[in-house]
């Protein structure tokens, strides 16, 4: 870029460059669980890029899925105790539909407002864990952060095997992320869909850890 506008955060990282759309908060959705396992519709499968971070006021798990038996919308699958409140923060590339009463605004060549002083851009994403160490990444990673945080919903690992007690049958357990905010601090970890430990009597056990980092944001900024 030879000339134009460039906006950066307090760490000097650009979040807007002239001629681009910033990645900003476009929706906040709140859901209350009615049973142990369920799903909530987040946004349509319209081909537009979005990024999701989520938190809950209880321990459990959630993950994103494209479509289910009802339609092809993106849904947030989850398992929490009944009455748990889940908050999803959805970020995307989208022009501003309204303007603040005062402040700064930038328009593009199509006369569309691309950013103003009240736009909430995605910034300060923390990548947690060490992929080089199995026990410090993916399905085994766990940390507690002070304050109000949300994590990107994702699968972090899984285990399969054969249950031999009470009759032979397949065993599977997949691990997903959770950000549990208790009002003062946030537990970020992976949670197994059938528990965090392997039950007794399982043979041919295979455990696969994705060794991914868990991406989280401080949602007090939003």
Image (cartoon, grey):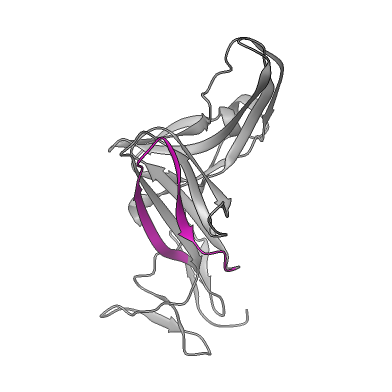
Residue sticking out furthest to the right: 204
Q: Position of residue 160 (x, y in %)?
A: 68, 25
In front here: 34 or 186?
34
Quadrant of the rendering where the N terminus is positioned: bottom right
Residue sticking out furthest to the front: 167
Quadrant of the rendering where the C terminus is positioned: bottom left
Q: Position of residue 50 (x, y in %)?
A: 54, 61
Above or below 182: residue 4: below
In front here: 111 or 193?
193
Identify the residue shown where x is 52% and y is 32%: 190
Q: How many labels were placed on the picture?
A: 0
Q: Is residue 31 found inside the magenta-colored segment of the image?
A: yes
In front here: 100 or 174?
174
Q: Position of residue 144 (x, y in %)?
A: 41, 32
Residue sticking out furthest to the left: 101
Above or below 65: residue 146: above
Identify the residue shown where x is 55% and y is 19%: 197
Is residue 194 shown left or right of residue 133? left
Confirm whether residue 214 shows in the render.
Answer: yes
Secondary structure mainly formed by the magenta segment: strand
Is residue 214 shown left or right of residue 146? right
Q: Position of residue 22 (x, y in %)?
A: 50, 70
Q: Is residue 27 found inside the magenta-colored segment of the image?
A: yes
Q: Which residues are magenta?
A: 24-46
Identify the residue shown where x is 46% and y is 41%: 78
Above or below 91: residue 156: above
Identify the residue shown where x is 47% and y is 50%: 53
Confirm whether residue 137 shows in the render.
Answer: no
In front here: 169 or 201?
169
Q: Quadrant of residue 206?
A: top right
């Amino acid at each position: 870029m030879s000339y134009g506008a460039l906006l950066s955060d307090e760490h000097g990282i650009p979040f807007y460059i002239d001629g681009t759309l910033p990645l900003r908060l476009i929706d906040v959705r709140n859901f209350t669980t009615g049973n142990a396992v369920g799903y909530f519709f987040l946004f349509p499968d319209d081909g537009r890029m979005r990024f999701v971070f989520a938190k809950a006021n209880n321990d459990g798990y959630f993950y994103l899925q494209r479509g289910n038996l009802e339609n092809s919308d993106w849904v947030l699958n989850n398992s929490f105790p009944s009455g748990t409140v889940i908050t999803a923060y959805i970020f995307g590339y989208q022009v501003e539909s309204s303007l603040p009463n005062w402040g700064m605004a930038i328009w593009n060549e199509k006369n569309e407002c691309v950013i103003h002083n009240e736009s909430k851009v995605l910034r300060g994403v923390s990548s947690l864990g060490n992929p080089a160490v199995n026990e410090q990444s993916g399905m085994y990673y766990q940390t507690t952060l002070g304050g109000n945080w949300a994590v990107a919903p994702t699968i972090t690992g899984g285990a399969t095997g054969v249950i031999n007690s009470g009759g032979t049958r397949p065993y599977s357990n997949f691990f997903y992320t959770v950000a549990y905010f208790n009002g003062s601090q946030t537990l970020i970890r992976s949670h197994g869909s059938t528990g965090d430990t392997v039950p007794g009597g399982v043979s041919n056990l295979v455990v696969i850890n994705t060794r991914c980092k868990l991406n989280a944001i401080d949602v007090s900024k939003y």
